[in-house]
Amino acid sequence: KAKELGRNNFQYFAAEMNTSVTDRLELLNRLRQAIPNDEFALHYQPKLNLRTGRIIGVEALIRWHTPGGMVSPGSFIPLAEETGLIIPIGEWVLRTACRQNREWQKAGYAPIPISVNLSPRQLARGDIVELVARVLQETGLDARYLELEITESVMATDVDKSFAMLTQLRALGVKISLDDFGTGYSSLSYLKRFPVDTLKIDQSFVRDIATSQDSAAIVKAIISLGHNLNLNVLAEGIETAAQSQFLQQNGCDEGQGYLMSRPIPTREFLNLLSAQ
Ligand code: C2E
Ligand code: MG
Ligand code: MG
Ligand code: MG
């Protein structure tokens, strides 16, 4: 009996593994063709000053439109990272975001910084500083209107190398944000030392602000930590007025979330910009 069960389990497992490998391969093959097939687009989510309600920045988020529908970054960015495809994809995102922001400025919109997410793999390559400098030059975007979002894990992997890299990026004039802050393992001593402009409080804490005393306490602690280190603090994932109010009352500088706007295509984003 046990033997039979074992064999069945194995067959079941093998069959499941098979499909997932095939699916993965198919996804990967399509992902390789996504740039030549022009299937990527950027959507834009505004960042607001929580006191004034004004748009003070915008985050570029990648979208992949396949013939079979939209694939979310949550399911292809990890694959792109594992396979190295994130290198050309990341370069496409950086160039497209910088070019777009420059075009908005040329069209007369008030200049705001655009944020681009960088994956650890892009930073590990060692040529990110050159790439950023080249893209700024090519697109004509002033460095102060570009912000790079990195996660804490980047700081923790090779401290000396990432310190040097962030320092050089900062020297170009770009800004640095720590994305998903609070979910990684960054030591607070790195934080003091590292050239960073903004802490982005992870949405998991923001979500539970009103219902969990722990989350509320963590959010307050991050806000005062950030301010004591002279950093700007932004809260991600604000969905309700109650969350927004809590953040405002506790001195959080900036916010981003569905309450204000989902990530939206260019045209809609420009409507928001001109409305203010
Ligand atoms: P992230 O950089 O932390 O971006 C925030 C994510 O939360 C986005 O998901 C955004 O659409 C979503 N979001 C914003 N406001 C709310 C809200 O109020 N409620 C909820 N539930 N979600 C909200 P998205 O666009 O699916 O991106 C997921 C992650 O994929 C990003 O997290 C980022 O890590 C990665 N990603 C997206 N675009 C790029 C890219 O161009 N390059 C790289 N390397 N990673 C990217
Ligand atoms: Mg981000
Ligand atoms: Mg985040
Ligand atoms: Mg994230």
Image (cartoon, rainbow, N blue to C red):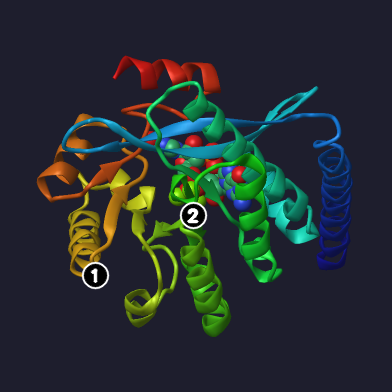
What's the residue type where badge 1 is placed?
Leu
> Disc 1 marks which residue?
229
Q: Residues within 10 Å of mark 2 (few under 14, many from 20)?
A: many
Label 1: state its secondary structure: loop
Q: Residue at x 44, y 50 (%)?
A: 144
Q: Is residue 103 left or right of residue 144?
A: right
What number of labels is visible? 2
What's the residue type where badge 2 is placed?
Glu
The residue lying furthest to the left in this view is 249
Q: Is mark 2 within 8 Å of ligand 2?
A: yes
**Residue 151 place in picture, x, y as percent:** 49, 62
Q: On residue 149, which mark appears? A: 2
Q: Residue at x 75, y 60 (%)?
A: 82
Q: Would you identify the image quadrant in which residue 178 lies?
A: bottom left
The relative height of residue 147 versus residue 63 in the rendered view (above or below) is below
Q: Residues within 10 Å of mark 1 (few under 14, many from 20)?
A: few
The relative height of residue 80 versus residue 64 in the rendered view (above or below) is below
Whether residue 57 is visible: yes
Q: Would you identify the image quadrant in which residue 11 lies?
A: bottom right
Label 2: state its secondary structure: strand
- Mark 2 or mark 1: whose residue is earlier in sequence: 2
